[in-house]
Amino acid sequence: MQQADCAVVGAGIVGLAMAYHLALKGKKVVVFERNPRATGASYRNFGLVWTIGQQAGQVYERALYGRGIWKEIAGRTGLSCKETGSLHLGYHDDEVSVMEEFARTGHAHCEVLTASAAAEKSSAFQPKGLKAALWSPMEMMLDPRVASATIAAFLHSEYKVDFHFHTAVNGISMPFVETKEGKWKVEQIYICSGQDFETLYPSVFDAAPITRCKLQMMRTVTQPGNWKLGPALSTGLSMLHYASFAQCPSLPELRKRIESTLPEYLQYGIHLLVSQNGAGELSLGDSHEYGKEVDPFDKEHINQLILQYIRTFLLAPSFAIQERWHGVYPKLTNGETDLILRPEPGVTILNGLGGAGMTLSFGLARDVVAGL
């Protein structure tokens, strides 16, 4: 029988963050991933470390901490991690009002720029009609399709974390973990299973305030002529989506206008983000549909709504789409930013980070391990 101090179930970003901080504490860590590689939400996202969308206080501090860890790991592994910053583009007075109110809170590293000052940051957006933009220098872009594998290799080589891919955990009876390879004996187990609520402790998940969120996204071909996006681009729709803007007094007026002019965008939870990977491809999206049951079929109508709005502000040379896909992540229904459950002694469930896993996982893992 094999043994370790700690077992982590799931090699997505939450599981990797836990393995990293446990290894830093000197623990012998084994990670089990049911797939040949992590291909869930950690693999299917924009690749953005999105600090500006996080709530003030502990959550924002976790985002800043995670940003620092990404930079450190990128420096030690060669993972591409670009400090591009972000621009929320304001083409309407109500959007500008929210930006100004948000900037005055002082909790995020940001400022409101005039249209001309925003144009100095990026030539990738439509300057005509722009009234102002919210600039943040903190956001970073990386390629999520290589990030998880890079971190896993780094943890194995630098900290001797033992990875077992294509190995599902079939059962837990502390202190034993059951897999196709036989039993492991461990002291602690951390379940970081993402949107898989059914395999381990399903009754615990049934009782928890958690559901699933399906997101549709697209990726363009490589942009011609070495064209660069620069900062990640977003719009007023994102200010309706991210909790950090929730306390802005002008937000209800912005929502009212969107409800009357773009009702389908609220119906499908569409807000617009544009990022670019090292190959020059643009990731475009996304939508949000909630429910425990996920429709396996994507709605082309949603994709067209995304493209229609993005074409109003993005001046990319090519909108030729080479890939369309959807991702699924766990989402809490009680407004919290994470779910930590302890269904039995020695077992901890970490879940519910929503769409902020790339941004918040390292900070959450740090705090969980600090409490051991």
Image: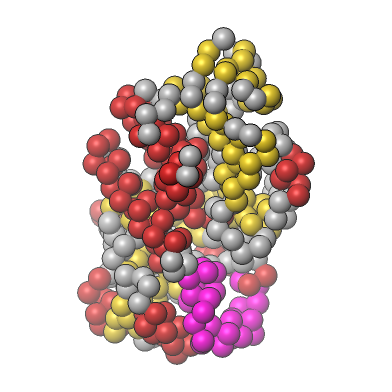
Residue 194 drawn at (x, y percent): 59, 43
Start-end of magenta stretch: 236-265
Query: Residue 364 at x, y = what percent?
Result: 47, 49
Quadrant of the image occupied by residue 34: top right
Task: Point out residue 79 in the picture as x, y percentages from the top left corner.
Answer: 30, 40
Which residue sits at x=37%, y=83%? 104
Q: Is residue 153 left or right of residue 247?
A: left
Of residues 286 and 83, the one nearer the viewer is 83
Q: How is the image coloured?
A: secondary structure
Q: Residue at x 37, y 73 (%)?
A: 107
Where the N terminus falls, by quadrant?
top right
Residue 360 lies, with reference to residue 154, above or below; the image says: below
The residue at the point 30 percent across, 51 percent down is: 68
Q: Is residue 228 visible?
A: yes
* Left or right, residue 351 beside residue 234: right
> Is 336 in the magenta?
no
Residue 267 placement: quadrant:
bottom right
For this orientation, the residue located farthest to the top is: 1
Q: Compared to 229, does 239 lie above or below?
A: below
